[in-house]
Image (cartoon, grey):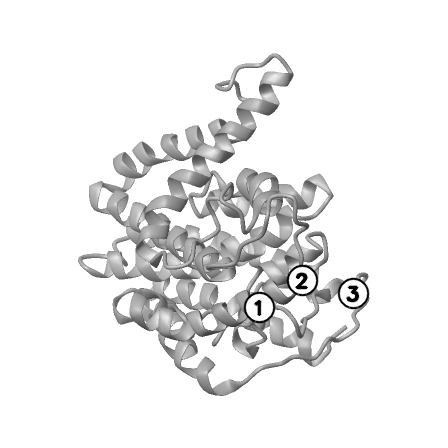
Amino acid sequence: MLSLRNISYLVSLFPGLLAILGNMKGSYWTLSAAVFSLIILGLLEWFVGKDRKNTQTENRDPFPELILYLHVAVQTAVVLTFLRGMYSQTLADAWIFWAAFSTGVAAGIGGIVPAHELIHKAKPLKQFFGKYLLMSCGNVYFFTHHLRIHHRYVATSQDSATARKGESLYAFMWRTIPGQYREAWQSEAKMLGKKGKSSFSFGNVLWFQTLIQIAFLPIVFFVLGPKALAAWLLYVLVAHLLLEYVNYIEHYGLYRENDERVSELHSWNSDSRISRYLLVDLSRHADHHFYAGKPYHTLQTYGNAPELPGGYAALLVPALFPPLWKALVHPRLEMWEQNRKKV
């Protein structure tokens, strides 16, 4: 149970713990989670190396699932300390916005990533915790879109969460968020229509979650003030931008025919040690799409899957500069296209 690999997954809790520290102490401490996650790990990832081992792990091992529930507790504390820090004025002046940025980074890593794992579980209680984590990050569309649209239409034009070849991160962000919301709404409306229900009924998960998020905003405004509301919106924005950055690099430029089965060839893979353990093996994304129900600690790496030139943390800066991104990724994408033609 306490294998080195399982212990390594505890690294995923560090951004959240640092965000809690920053929210409680204020001042320069508010930078902790962002500096650790985006700068220190981003630089280290170029040098730390990869872990390609396909360890055979029992699904019954309770430790990896325990880590997911630790994330639920840590993410709850992240949000509560952020709100408390604004209420107590521990987070004041410009530090309130640095705290919002760092808290958003921590939520993108320790909130949305574990939520992604939990919503794939079959048991309703586990899915509930996944939805709870998404709601704590201000996200309303991921649950519906990811399960019903993304996994079905990944690497096709019918999936707004798949980045096209040549599309910059900025253009993708502008297209994907409203596109995912629209596609999720259409899916909910279609499902409810078959039951003779309105799209605006509370049976529409997307509508219900949107109302909750909207209702929360005036509470923040009247209890904590306009600056706190701006900080909360920044927190939500940063968490979403990290989510969509991950979507961007996971399938960038890959494509398949509408009648072609999803396989390990339609997702970029990374065996970077830092990304693997920081993001509870989300970076073994090829196997996740090949077998969507596999628990994260049982995911395998494939020799024929397209491989990113770096880990998720390392590629954040290159993704911000389209020429650099293309220089790193397009040679690998062209090799993938050539191999595809031979099949």
According to the picture, the residue beneath numbered tag 1 turns out to be 269
- Which amino acid type is shown beneath numbered disc 2? Asp
Give the answer, above or below, for where 4 lies relative to 337: below
**Cα–Cα gap, marks 2 and 1:** 8 Å
Mark 1 secondary-structure assignment: loop
Residue found at x 37% / y 51%: 172
- Badge 1 density bin: few <14, some 14–19, many ≥20, Cα 10 Å: many
Identify whether 249 is placed above or below 127. below
The three-letter amino acid code for the residue at tag 3 is Asp
Screen quadrant of the C terminus: bottom right
- Indicate which label's residue lies in the foreground, 1 or 3: 1
* Sooner in the amino-acid sequence: mark 3 or mark 2: 3
| Residue at which label 2 appears | 287
What residue is disc 3 on? 61
Q: Is residue 284 visible?
A: no
Q: In the rendered view, does 53 fall on the left or right side of 276?
A: right
- Between the C-alphas of marks 3 and 2, the distance is 19 Å
Q: Is residue 233 left or right of residue 239?
A: left
Which residue lies at the image location 57% right of the left edge and 51% below the top edge? 115
Nearer the N terminus, badge 2 or badge 1?
Answer: 1
